[in-house]
């Protein structure tokens, strides 16, 4: 099952078309894509009835599939090779920060660059489907609604500004959370714990890895995070990025106006981010 946000309405993506969820359910399910995750079991039931598409699929209509999550968790240094390129030891507990929800944008987004120090980070993003608190190890996937593709765009100067790093601010400029193109349920994937993820800048591959290389996989992340705070339906977890970011290169390399960032997770989808110069305010 694939669920998307088409011009602000929740839809099922079926074959080459979409089904308006509120209409197909006779109004029992919300048209608001964010509220959908409060009724996830009912959404699954509707999808099992396989209603035929009622409109064509259009990528240009898609918005952030989870537009207003109450909580966005982001995990740092969750691939050993990325920790090594950053010159830090692999963590024994997931380093966690947030991306403020107002930074989220959709799968075909134009993002203004606030500086010349913006970096790319491909990530698998988990969407929580039901309340999760003190979840036992091995039970995490049972609380997952689905997966989506994410970019953790990062302004490195703000992120590392002394006297203390400002990870959440450096990663929360407007548009710094491209996501999409939809949320896909784990049962659609052969192995949701082993997905190839990659991104390119102007067609040049800059990152490529597999989620099986995560230090803390999806199940463990849900177990550990929910042991501290409840995870709520519609919350997001950016699970971390592999090696290949621009800021650790010699010399460092960052995004520039005119660049196109293409971000892909195997079996989940591809999103496109177009970088432009910041307009005068």
Image (cartoon, rainbow, N blue to C red):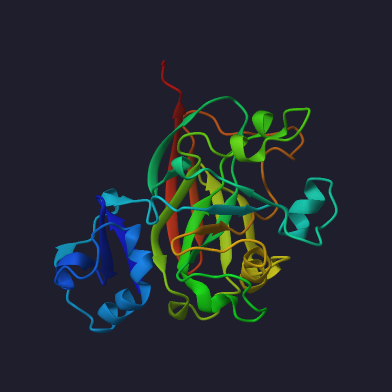
**158 or 98: nearer the viewer:** 98
Name the residue: 42% across, 47% down: 272
Q: Nearer the viewer, residue 13 or 224?
A: 224
* Res. 139 image quadrant: bottom right
**At 63% across and 29% down in the image, what residue appears?**
117
Taking the image as shown, residue 254 lies to the left or right of residue 32, namely right
- Residue 20 can be seen in this image: no
In percent of width and height, residue 79 lies at: 72, 59
| Residue found at the far top of this picture | 280
Number of marks: 0
Determine whether 278 is above or below 211 in the image: above
- In the image, is residue 142 above or below residue 3? below
Residue 32, how many percent across, how many down? 27, 57
Q: Position of residue 222 (x, y in %)?
A: 61, 68
Task: Give the side of residue 212 with respect to residue 177, left or right.
Answer: right
> How far across and how far down the image is residue 281, in percent?
41, 16
Q: Is residue 131 left or right of residue 210?
A: left
In the depicted structure, whether residue 267 falls above or below residue 61:
below
Q: Nearer the viewer, residue 247 or 141?
A: 141
Visible residue check, residue 230:
yes
Front in this rendered view, residue 22 or 204: 22
Residue found at x 61% / y 40%: 168
Residue at image point 64% right, 81% down? 138
Which image quadrant: the N terminus? bottom left
């Amino acid at each position: 099952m694939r669920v998307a946000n088409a011009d602000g309405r929740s839809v099922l993506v079926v074959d080459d078309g979409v089904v308006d969820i509120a209409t197909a359910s006779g109004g029992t399910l919300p048209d608001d894509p964010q509220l959908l995750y409060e009724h996830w079991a009912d959404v699954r039931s509707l999808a099992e009835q396989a209603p035929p598409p009622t409109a064509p699929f259009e990528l240009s209509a898609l918005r952030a599939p989870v537009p207003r999550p109450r909580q966005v968790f982001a995990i740092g240094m969750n691939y050993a090779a990325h920790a090594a390129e950053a010159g830090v030891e692999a963590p024994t507990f997931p380093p966690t920060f947030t991306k403020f929800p107002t930074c989220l944008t959709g799968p075909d987004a134009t993002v203004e660059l606030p500086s010349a120090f913006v970096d790319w980070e491909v990530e698998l993003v988990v969407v929580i489907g039901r309340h999760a608190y003190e979840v036992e190890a091995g039970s995490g996937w049972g609380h997952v609604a689905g997966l989506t593709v994410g970019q953790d765009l990062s302004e490195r100067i703000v992120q590392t500004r002394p006297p203390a790093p400002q990870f959440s601010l450096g990663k929360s400029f407007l548009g710094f959370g491209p996501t999409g193109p939809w949320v896909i349920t784990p049962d659609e994937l052969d192995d949701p714990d082993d997905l190839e993820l990659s991104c390119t800048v102007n067609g040049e591959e800059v990152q490529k890895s597999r989620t099986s290389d995560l230090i803390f996989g999806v199940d463990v992340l849900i177990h550990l995070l929910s042991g501290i705070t409840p995870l709520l339906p519609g919350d997001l977890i950016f699970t971390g990025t592999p090696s290949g970011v621009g800021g650790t290169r010699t010399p460092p390399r960052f995004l520039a106006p005119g660049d196109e960032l293409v971000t892909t997770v195997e079996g989940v989808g591809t999103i496109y981010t177009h970088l432009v110069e910041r307009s005068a305010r």
